[in-house]
Every structure is written in structure tokens, then in C-alpha cells.
Image: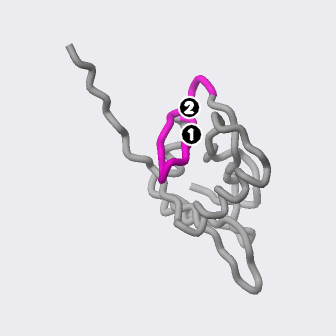
Amino acid sequence: MSESITEIKSPISISSSALKQLERLRTENNVPEDYGLRVGVKGGGCSGFSYVLGFDEQKENDQIFSIEGIKILMEKAHGIYLIGMEVDWLEGLNNRGFTFNNPNASETCGCGTSFSA
């Protein structure tokens, strides 16, 4: 009897420029291979929630996705706030860093890292 594996589509997307920067950060910081990229939210920030983005160990309540070979870790409860979000990398004269394009955000702050839903 063969076991079927169901792959769940990632609720978020990551732009190619952000993927490139994440790979650079993983290499420069010697992030262990078994770590994944944690994407989530936490209370706080100017608008009520702020984004979490960083390499971390897998935890018991994580959902696991894969985007272009990068393991994505996300707590199930955070999905409602993040579904459809794109993580991008901005490199301009005034701004440089990761940005979060979230269709679920009813308000965002000028800092670009906090939102309300």
C-alpha cells in the first residue's frame, strides 16, 4: 500500500530579489542547514502587528512549505494574516531591505513593517 503525499501550496510568495538576499544572509551568517525561514506576525508595531522574518529551528506547531528550495516555517494561526502576502527586497536610494506586500492589511505604517488587519 503506497502512501500519498499532499503538498500544500505556500500561502505566501517571495520575490526573486528577496530569495537572492535570503540565500546571501544564510551563507554570510552560517545558518545551519536544518533551519528554515520563519515568517509570521507578532503583536506590536505602530499599527498593531509587526512581521517576523528570520531563520529559525522548526517548532512543533509549525506548518512547513517550500519556496524555491527554501524551507518556510509558519505557525498555523499566522496564516490568516499572511495569506497572499509577498516578501520582496527593495534596493533604492531611500529604502533598502525586505518589504511585505500584504493584501490582508487594512492599514500599514510608514515603517513598512507593521500593519493592522
Locate residue 56, reporting x and y percent.
69, 38
Identified by mark 2, the residue type is Asp
Which residue occupies the foreground of this view, 33 or 46?
33
- Mark 1 or mark 2, earlier in chain: 2
* Magenta segment main secondary structure: strand
Q: Residue at x 31, y 33 (%)?
A: 6
Q: Secondary structure at mark 2?
A: strand
Identified by mark 1, the residue type is Met
Residue 115 lies in quadrant = bottom right
Q: Identify the residue at the far left of this view.
A: 1
Locate residue 111, reporting x and y percent.
74, 69
Which residue occupies the foreground of this view, 96 or 21?
21
Pointer 2 local density, CA inside 10 Å: few below 14, some 14–19, many at least 20: some
Q: Residue at x 69, y 78 (%)?
A: 91
Is the image coloured rainbow, by chain, by secondary structure, or in one colour? one colour
Could you tell whether 43 is left or right of 104 in the image? Answer: right
Q: In the rendered view, tell whether residue 24 sits above or below residue 42.
A: below
Which residue occupies the foreground of this view, 47 or 68?
68
CA distance for labels 1 and 2: 5 Å
Q: Quadrant of the N terminus?
A: top left
CB-based contact (under 8 Å), mark 1 and mark 2: yes
Q: Which residues are magenta?
A: 59-75
Could you tell whether 4 is left or right of 91 in the image? Answer: left
Q: Which mark is residue 62?
A: 2
Q: In the rendered view, tell whether residue 105 sits above or below residue 62.
A: below
Q: Residue at x 26, y 25 (%)?
A: 4
- Does the segment drawn in magenta span residue 61? yes
Locate residue 60, reporting x and y percent.
59, 23
Which residue occupies the foreground of this view, 106 or 99?
99
Q: In the rendered view, tell whether residue 109 sits above or below residue 31.
A: below
- Does the segment drawn in magenta span residue 105? no
Question: Where does label 1 land, which residue?
Answer: 74
